[in-house]
Image (spheres, rainbow, N blue to C red):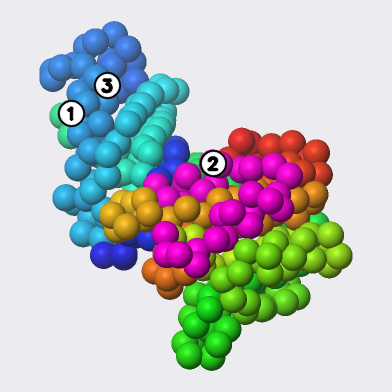
Amino acid sequence: MRDISRKINTLRTAHAHAVLKVSPDTVRRIKSADLPKADPLPIARVAAIQAAKNTAQIIPYCHPLPIDFVGVEFELSETQIDIRVQVTAIYKTGVEMEALTAASVAALTLYDMLKIIDEDMEIGSVRLVLKRGGKSDFKDQQKTKLRCAVLVMSDSISAGTKTDESGKLIEKRLLAENMEVVEYKVIPDDQFVIEEQLKRYADEMKVDLVVSTGGTGLSPRDCTPEAMANVIDRLIPGMSETARAYGQERTPYSMLSRGICGARGSTLIINMPGSKGGVADSLDALFPAALHAFNMMKAGGHPCKADA
């Protein structure tokens, strides 16, 4: 199975459609309840719901997931029965296989219950109609490439006694998100130096995004949150809360991070922990959804693919 432990929960929806081709007489007998077995439609609906909930037991590489809703509708035309299924869940992976499995089992159930009166039935198609959810639906398309800076706060790294890994991880992720890293800089854990560097990025260089690492803990020299409080115009608590909540599900030490996020002018500043693991968790938790902040700061509103 694919490892999805790094993913975040989002609202996932999938619609599937199946077609069962039948004779006109079969349709007539369903409508008039003239059948040797019970009404097949409600039984096929229950079968579809059960199939959606048990997809992981049927298809080996599917993940078990908590399904919140399964909807099954039937439409009878002259020579076919259309089966439409909707599956919804809030989870880390999509529900398209659950929807397709449900539609398939509904068609098979109808086939089983109607074969006694119609030997020429045919399952015509089973297809995915719609799939929504996941990070890709919350990735805003930026009209211009964002200019970013990576700032590492560490006495030991700035003194050359330790090698930086966290800052390089941030730089790699920003480049993967199609952003331009205009500066990567290492400075000591000095509040005045941190404040001046953040002001330089926002006021002089006017970068779009600053991602920092380090100085967010409880050691005597950790002062990044205090420096941030003196620099930012507006606090964005939801971002730091999200990063800590994501990290807390993976390590109980996440609650000890004091990093904050905010904006100075049109520059978004994000604090991340100093550890490589803490940075990896924060990046997974915040990107790419955090980039929607730039559309908001430019009064671009909230439209995204997931709202379509």
Question: Mark 3 belongs to which amino acid?
Answer: Leu
**Residue at horizontal 73 percent and vertical 68 percent from the top:** 197
**Residue at horizontal 23 percent and vertical 48 percent from the top:** 64
3 vs 2, front mark: 2
In front of the other: 151 or 75: 151
Sooner in the amino-acid sequence: mark 3 or mark 2:
3
Mark 2 neighbour density, 10 Å: few (under 14) some (14–19) many (20 or more): few
**Residue at horizontal 54 percent and vertical 91 percent from the top:** 160
Residue 222 position, x and y percent, is 50, 64
Position of residue 130 in the picture relative to residue 205 (left or right): left
Q: Are marks 3 and 2 in contact (CB under 8 Å)?
A: no
Residue 285 in view of the camera: no
Q: Which residue is mark 3?
A: 41
Separation (CA) of disc 3 from disc 2: 46 Å
Q: Is residue 264 above or below residue 85?
A: below
Residue 164 position, x and y percent, is 51, 82
Q: Secondary structure at mark 3?
A: helix
Q: Which residue is mark 2?
A: 238
Total numbered circles? 3
Residue 218 position, x and y percent, is 42, 59
